[in-house]
């Protein structure tokens, strides 16, 4: 088997079939799949448009990051649900968003422990060093819960650092939800990848971005899925029992620049999720199923992963980057290797078993959710014993009774 880096051929594809690849030719590794985009369907330009029931933005950043999403919501005629946490955002800070004319419902997210949501085995089985300190997955799960209670059947998840150039792309994504469980938008601008994959690209590797939760339209009434609290949680959302759920891609959004090498801890906390997701998608790339993710697969894949990261490290001295950037990349890759050293096949298998159990628990929970008229009504019903309902802010509520169910009143 070829474990060296070699030049890759130009990608191919077309409308009506697998999504067209957009990366330039580069180096490829026999131990890493730099693209999974052939797993997506690109239905083509004839796609009809559909309604959007809500745009959801989980955020910890300043309200200025939300202006674009608010303008989109106004243009598309749907509410913007903002799930806030941290010192820079929240209901106390977002009132100026009302000047943009959009219907906005902001929620101060105080943590999933304050809600009557399932307690996921995927969170409890992991040793403390593997647990994440972010709340993005929990916010998205709350949004899915609210969507089912409020009969929001077509929801668009957007990150606060994503810009949508053409609102019609979101309408076309919503239109595809009649046929697909989820529809992603291609990420342009700054690449949306893990730290390791950013480093691979920097040394000349042929690396693309897959679709993800940063720009994703989902159908919530017909399909029941959840976001586990792990890096690549959006990839897990897109999976079902034995493979990928019906998934398409249309349109383009732009990712704002960020620094993937700012701290080695980012690479360290991503590693388990990157191993699990890339290990499963490796099987899907080969036409196999998740059921093939047995002990032997993880033994082999962990060896491949170490060989891949080590190969990127070896190429760093020749990378066309500044010396300071090279040092930070090296520190990040070594952090990934350090975390990889304590990931075992048994841990991978245990996580997948927990994920399967959580999928069932979430499905049972979602099918029994009561209907609610407003976000506030839903949050009161979801408040855990001993916890107050989350604080909300309602801006520019709709006048019609039909749309009033989307407000926080």
Image: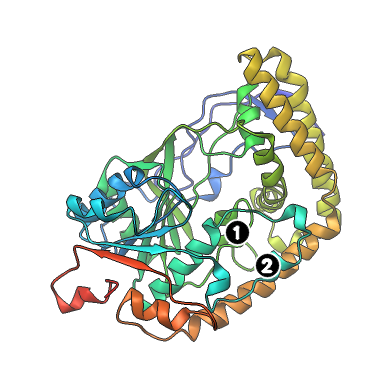
Q: Is residue 292 above or below residue 7?
A: below
Direction from residue 368 to residue 303 in the image, left or right: right
User: Going 33% across and 48% down the picture, which residue do you hit?
Assistant: 66
In this view, the residue in front, 154 or 370, is: 370
Q: Residue 236 in the image: state x and y as whole percent.
A: 60, 59
Q: Earlier in the sequence, mark 1 or mark 2?
A: 1
Q: What residue is disc 2 on?
A: 355
Mark on residue 347?
none
At horizontal 77% and vertical 27% (from top left) the residue drawn is 311
* Residue 374 visible, this orientation: yes
Under tag 1, what secondary structure? helix
Residue 326: image x %, image y %? 67, 19
Query: Residue 242: x and y, percent?
Result: 65, 65
Specify the label residue 236 is tagged with: 1
Look at the numbered discs 1 and 2 and tell me whether their residues touch, using CB distance below 8 Å: yes
Q: Give the image location of residue 87, x and y in percent.
A: 46, 50
Q: Secondary structure at mark 2?
A: helix
Location of residue 148 with respect to 38 vertically, above or below: below
Mark 1 vs mark 2, CA separation in Å: 9 Å
Q: Is residue 202 above or below residue 379?
A: above
The quarter in which the N terminus is drawn is top right
Q: In the rendered view, would you say 100 is above or below 80?
A: above
Q: In the rendered image, which quarter is residue 271 located in?
A: top right
């Amino acid at each position: 088997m070829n474990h060296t880096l070699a030049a890759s051929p130009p990608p191919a594809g077309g409308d009506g079939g697998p999504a067209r690849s957009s990366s330039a030719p580069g180096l490829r590794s026999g131990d890493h799949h730099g693209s999974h985009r052939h797993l997506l369907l690109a239905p083509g330009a004839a796609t009809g448009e559909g309604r959007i029931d809500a745009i959801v933005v989980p955020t910890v950043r300043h309200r200025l990051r939300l202006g674009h999403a608010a303008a989109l919501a106004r243009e598309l005629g749907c509410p913007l649900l903002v799930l806030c946490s941290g010192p820079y955002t929240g209901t106390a800070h977002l009132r100026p968003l009302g000047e943009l004319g959009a219907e906005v419902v902001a929620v101060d997210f105080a943590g999933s422990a304050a809600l009557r949501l399932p307690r996921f085995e995927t969170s409890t089985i992991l040793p403390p060093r593997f647990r994440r300190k972010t709340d993005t997955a929990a916010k998205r799960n709350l949004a899915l819960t609210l969507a089912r209670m409020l009969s929001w059947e077509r929801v668009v998840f957007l990150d606060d650092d994503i810009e949508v150039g053409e609102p019609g792309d979101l309408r076309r994504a919503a239109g595809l939800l009649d046929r697909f469980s989820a529809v992603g938008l291609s990420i342009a601008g700054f690449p949306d990848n893990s730290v390791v994959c950013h480093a691979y690209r920097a040394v000349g590797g042929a690396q693309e971005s897959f679709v993800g939760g940063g720009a994703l339209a989902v159908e919530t009434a017909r399909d029941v899925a959840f976001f586990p609290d792990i890096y690549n949680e959006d990839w897990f959302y897109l999976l079902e029992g034995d493979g990928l759920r019906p998934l398409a891609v249309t349109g383009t959004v732009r990712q704002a620049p960020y620094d993937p090498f700012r701290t080695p801890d980012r690479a360290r906390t991503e590693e388990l999720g990157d191993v699990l997701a890339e290990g499963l998608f490796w099987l899907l790339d080969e036409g196999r199923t998740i059921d093939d993710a047995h002990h032997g697969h993880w033994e082999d894949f962990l060896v491949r992963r170490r060989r891949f990261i080590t190969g990127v490290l070896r190429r760093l001295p020749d990378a066309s980057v500044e010396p300071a950037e090279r040092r930070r990349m090296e520190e990040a890759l070594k952090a990934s290797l350090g975390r990889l050293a304590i990931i075992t096949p048994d841990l991978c298998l245990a996580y997948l078993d927990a994920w399967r159990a959580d999928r069932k628990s979430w499905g049972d929970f979602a099918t029994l959710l009561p209907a609610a008229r407003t976000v506030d009504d839903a949050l009161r019903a979801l408040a855990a014993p001993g916890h107050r309902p989350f604080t909300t802010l309602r801006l520019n509520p709709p006048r019609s009774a039909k749309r009033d169910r989307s407000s926080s009143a």
